[in-house]
């Protein structure tokens, strides 16, 4: 009984899931079956046979319709399979093309990386070689400096913001060669002490300007420690606005220069580049008239574009000023002769 109940439940569920056309066809079939059963039971054989033939025709039409529907489903399935196969083939081709492209790109990148590493190794080796040579030059210059002078106190360090030993060596060579009586230095520090030792030998005088009062005080302390205060003087010259060639610069206070005349050697090592572009260009604009009739001008840090441009502008605009070859270091040496100025 329970199985019959379950069968009835399943049948009821299936009947409820029929669509309207399916329900109409089922009802028509049931009516025909009932008509055949009634006609056969009442003795109307011809009517029963007619209804049975009609029922068979309906069943045949249903089978044909079902066959046609299944054929449509098969064709749709075949078309979907063909489309899916086409999509899969296209995706495979794209994946293969992408993988091949990435493989070629990876190969190119690998070659480029190999070349870069090789070039870097060569440059690094070359750079190390240049560094060793530069260190050798500086050590040799330092030995020559200490052979020339015997300091009376520990010397301040050179390099970095101070002049390198090679720069100092050539600067002291210029003093020994030209025997200047008055040297003016823009920017005090390590070079101030070395210059004072060189000028002490020949009876010269050094005036050093610095915009930083603390730095100037440290330089004075070094000069005192070395017993050079009578040879060198450090003046504090705060930076102020100065107009030269139609431009405004931040340069030393010119009031600290009013008493200077006949400068035999001018060392331009300030103001610092951080104070502004072309920071050292105004130097000769202010001090040209205070140079001796023949003088030497030295500009430090000429490896920088601003200093190179300053040398070009000076030598083009100032009569009697010409660049000289420098032996060592990173500065430009220029000779000045007022006699070369046309009257």
Image: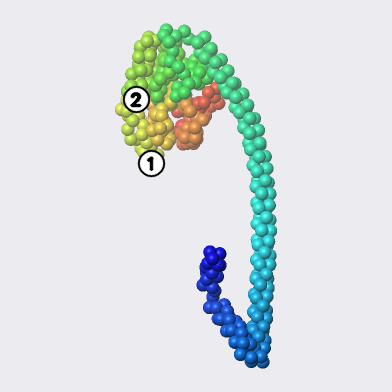
Which element is circle 1 on?
A: loop
Residue drawn at (47%, 7%), measured in percent from left and top?
150
Task: Identify residue for label 1.
Answer: 246
In front of the other: label 2 or label 1? Answer: 2
Q: Which quadrant holds residue 250?
A: top left
Say if residue 123 shows up in the picture: yes
Q: Nearer the viewer, residue 246 or 12?
A: 12
Distance from Cα at disc 2 to Cα at disc 1: 27 Å
Q: Residues within 10 Å of mark 2 (few under 14, many from 20)?
A: some
Q: Is residue 229 above or below residue 211?
A: above
Which label is found at residue 212? 2
So how many labels did they put on this image? 2
Residue 319 placement, left or right of 260: right
Give the color scheme: rainbow, by chain, secondary structure or one colour. rainbow
Q: Nearer the viewer, residue 171 or 45?
A: 45
Residue drawn at (58%, 81%), measured in percent from left and top?
30
Q: Is residue 105 above or below residue 113?
A: below
Which element is circle 2 on?
A: loop
Q: Residues within 10 Å of mark 1 (few under 14, many from 20)?
A: few
Residue drawn at (68%, 65%), measured in percent from left and top?
82
Which part of the image, by quadrant, shows the N terminus?
bottom right
- Sequence-wise, the earlier of marks 2 and 1 is 2
The location of residue 87, given as percent across then percent down, is: 65, 61
Q: Nearer the viewer, residue 60 or 258?
A: 60
Q: Is residue 214 above or below residue 86?
A: above
The location of residue 332, given as percent across then percent down, is: 50, 27
């Amino acid at each position: 009984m329970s199985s019959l109940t379950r069968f009835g439940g399943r049948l009821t569920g299936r009947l409820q899931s029929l669509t309207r056309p399916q329900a109409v066809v089922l009802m028509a079939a049931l009516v025909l079956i009932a008509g055949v059963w009634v006609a056969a039971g009442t003795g109307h054989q011809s009517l029963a046979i007619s209804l049975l033939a009609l029922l068979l025709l309906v069943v045949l039409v249903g089978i044909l319709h079902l066959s046609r529907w299944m054929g449509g489903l098969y064709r749709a399935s075949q078309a979907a399979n063909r489309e899916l196969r086409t999509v899969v083939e296209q995706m495979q081709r794209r994946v293969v093309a992408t993988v091949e492209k990435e493989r070629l790109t990876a190969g190119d990148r690998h070659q480029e990386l190999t070349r870069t590493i090789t070039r870097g190794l060569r440059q690094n080796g070359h750079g190390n070689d240049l560094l060793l040579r530069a260190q050798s030059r500086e050590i040799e210059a330092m030995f020559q400096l200490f052979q020339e002078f015997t300091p009376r106190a520990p010397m301040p360090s050179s390099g970095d913001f101070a002049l390198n030993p090679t720069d100092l060596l050539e600067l002291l060579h210029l003093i020994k060669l030209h025997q200047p009586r008055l040297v003016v230095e823009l920017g005090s520090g390590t070079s101030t002490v070395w210059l004072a030792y060189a000028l002490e030998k020949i009876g010269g005088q050094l005036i050093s300007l610095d915009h930083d009062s603390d730095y100037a005080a440290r330089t004075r302390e070094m000069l005192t420690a070395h017993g050079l205060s009578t040879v060198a003087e450090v003046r504090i010259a705060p930076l102020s606005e100065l107009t030269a060639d139609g431009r405004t610069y931040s340069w030393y206070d010119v009031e600290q220069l009013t008493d200077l005349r006949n400068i035999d050697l001018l060392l331009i090592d300030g103001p610092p580049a951080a104070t502004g572009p072309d920071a050292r260009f105004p130097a000769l604009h202010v001090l040209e008239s205070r140079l001796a009739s023949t003088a030497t001008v030295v500009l430090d840090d000429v490896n920088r574009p601003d200093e190179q441009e300053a040398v070009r502008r000076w030598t083009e605009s100032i009569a009697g000023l010409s660049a000289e070859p420098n032996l060592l270091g990173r500065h430009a040496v220029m000779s000045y002769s007022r006699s070369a100025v046309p009257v």
